[in-house]
Structures are given as structure tokens and as C-alpha cells.
Amino acid sequence: MKLFKGLCYVIGVAQLILGALYLFAPQAFIAWQGLSAIGADIGYPFAMLAGRFIVYGVGMFVIASDPVRNRFWLFGMIAIQAFDLAGGLFYTLSGTVALEHSAFPMFNATWIILGLFFLRQATTEEKPASPA
């Protein structure tokens, strides 16, 4: 369980960092990733995306505090990462995004999926305490 909670905290911090970058420095963050320059108006949907990163980042801390009770949200993060991986594969295989730009995010999505999926056993093996 300790390893699972640690993983949740690491993922939570990563989500908060992504949220901050997309909220406060979307142009610079996109350029740093080596992707095409974006128009200033794209900052608006990135701000909306940032909100989701930030909320799920905090959510990962909540999941870590009580994995059994928050299993639904745990599976939500696994699903989000599956979408991220699928999108990365699609855009990379179609030639839209170079592997050098998509490899790191796809690697992250993969280890998050596998880590949460396999370590979640700790949350399913423990039963909530019954009322006294």
C-alpha cells in the first residue's frame, strides 16, 4: 500500500506541474516540447485543460489518502492515461507528431497505467472496516 500511495503522490505532483505550465506558460511549454507554435487564442482551451490537470492532481492526493473509498477516481486516472496513450499512438503513427516529441508523454502514460493498474491490488485486497 505504501508504494501505491507514493505513486499517487508522484502522479499528483506531475499533474499539478502540467496544469501550472498549461495555465501560466502554454506558449513556452508547447515550444519546449518541440511542437508547432500555437495562436494566443489557444491559451483559453489550455486554461480549461489546466483546470482538469490541477483538479486531478489534487484528486491523486485524495486517492492516496483512502484508495478503497476512491477507487472510482483511481480508475478514472487510468482511463485518462489510456486516452493520452491512444492519442499519442494515433498522432505519432499518422505522422502528425514525431516520435521524439511523443515518446516521453507516451512512456509516462504507460508507466502510470501499469503502476496504478497493478498496484491497485492493494486497494482491492483491503476491505473497508465494518462498523463496530
Image: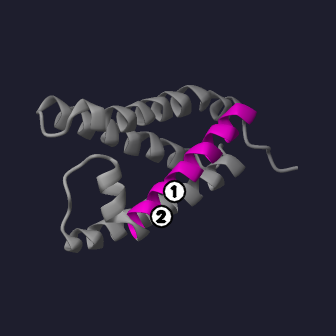
Name the dominant secondary structure of the magenta segment: helix
- Tell me: residue 64, above or below residue 2: below
Q: Is 45 covered by the magenta stretch?
A: no
Q: Which residues are magenta?
A: 1-23
Mark 1–mark 2 contact, CB under 8 Å? yes
Who's the residue at 35% across and 61% down the image?
A: 28
Quadrant in which the N terminus is drawn: top right
Q: CA distance from mark 1 to mark 2?
A: 5 Å
Residue 124 is situated, as x and y percent measured from the top left of the image, at 63, 32
Q: Residue at left 49%, top 27%?
A: 114
Q: Is residue 117 visible?
A: yes
The residue beneath circle 1 is 17
**On the rendered structure, is 68 left or right of 36?**
right
Instruction: Please say whether residue 66 is visible from this viewpoint.
Output: no
Q: Which residue is painted at 19% across and 39% down in the image? A: 97
Q: Position of residue 56 (x, y in %)?
A: 50, 57
Place of residue 27 in the rendered image (x, y in percent of width and height, measured from the top left):
30, 63
Q: How many marks?
A: 2
Q: Is residue 85 left or right of residue 39?
A: right
Depth check: 68 or 114 in front? 114
Q: Amino acid at mark 2?
A: Ala
Residue at the spot of label 2: 20
Element on which disc 2 rests: helix
Q: Residue furthest right?
A: 132
Numbered label attached to residue 66? none
- Residue beneath the point at 64% across and 47% down: 9
x and y percentages locating residue 95 in the rendered image: 12, 33
Corner quadrant of residue 68? top right
The amino acid beneath tag 1 is Ile
- Callout 1: helix, strand or loop? helix
